[in-house]
Image: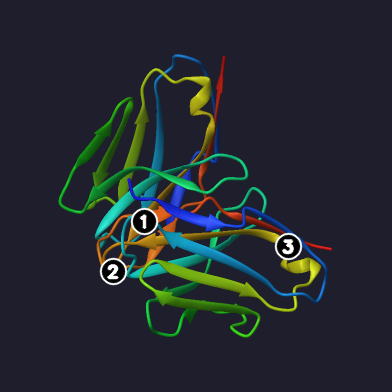
Amino acid sequence: KQEVTQIPAALSVPEGENLVLNCSFTDSAIYNLQWFRQDPGKGLTSLLLIQSSQREQTSGRLNASLDKSSGRSTLYIAASQPGDSATYLCATNTGNQFYFGTGTSLTVIP
Amino acid sequence: GAVVSQHPSRVICKSGTSVKIECRSLDFQATTMFWYRQFPKQSLMLMATSNEGSKATYEQGVEKDKFLINHASLTLSTLTVTSAHPEDSSFYICSASRLVTGGELFFGEGSRLTVL
C-alpha cells in the first residue's frame, strides 16, 4: 500500500521568504501527484497536478516538481505571503486510489 | 478548475436522527466520488469510493449500514449518516474525479456535522 509522508509537519517563516515543502511516497507507480491547500474548516483546493510523465508544474508563485524514481515531490513557494498560511497536502493517484500525506501546516509571519 | 459543491456546510442534529450530505460536481461528470472524514488536525480518512450506478466500496472499519452512500448520477453522490450519535460528529468532505484513472481530484467545501 502506498505511504505518503510530508516533512516538516509544521513550518513557520517570515513574510517574503521562499520555502520548500516536501512529499515522499513509497510506490513510484503513480498516475499523477497533486498538491492541495486546506484552510481551517474548509475543503481542499487543488493547487497543482503533475502527471507521471512530467517533471514539474508551475502556477504563479508555486512550482511543484516530481521525481518518480526517488519517490519525491516538492512544492516551492516563492516570496511567501501571510495569505499562504494554510495546511498543504500532497496526494498520489495510483489507478483512481488516492493516498494523502498528513500535511504541512505553514504559517507565514507578517 | 472544476467545481464540486457540498451541502450543507454545517448541520446540527439530535442523537438518533439521520443526516444527508450532498456532493455535486457542477461542471463535469464525475466517474468516481470519494467520501472522507477528517478529525481535528489530522489528515483525511477515506471512508468509501463510489462509482455511478454501482454500490460504494467501503474502507475497512467503516460501517456501510451506518454511512449510506448513493451515487445515482454522474454529478451527484450522497452520504447519509443514519441514527447519528455524538461520536459521528466530524468534518466530512467529498471529492470527485473526472477520469477512471489518472484524473485530477476536486474537493467539496466540506460539511461540519455536530450531533448533540
Q: Is residue B21 left or right of residue A1?
A: right
User: Tag 1, which chain?
Assistant: B
Q: Quadrant of residue A31?
A: bottom left
Residue drawn at (39%, 54%), measured in percent from left and top?
B106
Residue drawn at (25%, 61%), measured in percent from left and top?
B102
Is residue B25 depicted above or below A16 in this figure? below
Q: Which residue is mark 3?
A: B89
User: Callout 2: few (<14), some (14-19), or many (20+) C-alpha neighbours within 10 Å?
Assistant: some
Q: Is residue A58 visible?
A: yes
Look at label 3 and name its amino acid. Ser
Q: Quadrant of residue B52?
A: bottom left
Q: Earlier in the sequence, mark 3 or mark 1?
A: 3
Assess whether mark 1 and mark 3 are in contact (beta carbons under 8 angstroms): no
User: Tag 2, which chain?
Assistant: A
Look at label 1 and name its amino acid. Leu
Q: Which residue is mark 1?
A: B105
Q: Are marks 2 and 1 on the same chain?
A: no
Counting from the top left corner in percent of width and height, residue B41 is at: 64, 48
Residue drawn at (46%, 80%), measured in percent from left and top?
B56
Q: Are marks 3 and 1 on the same chain?
A: yes
Q: Is residue B5 left or right of residue B62?
A: left
Look at label 2 and name its amino acid. Gly
Residue drawn at (68%, 59%), measured in percent from left and top?
B90
Give the Cα distance between marks 2 and 1. 12 Å
Q: Quadrant of residue A2?
A: bottom left
Give the number of the disc on residue B45: none
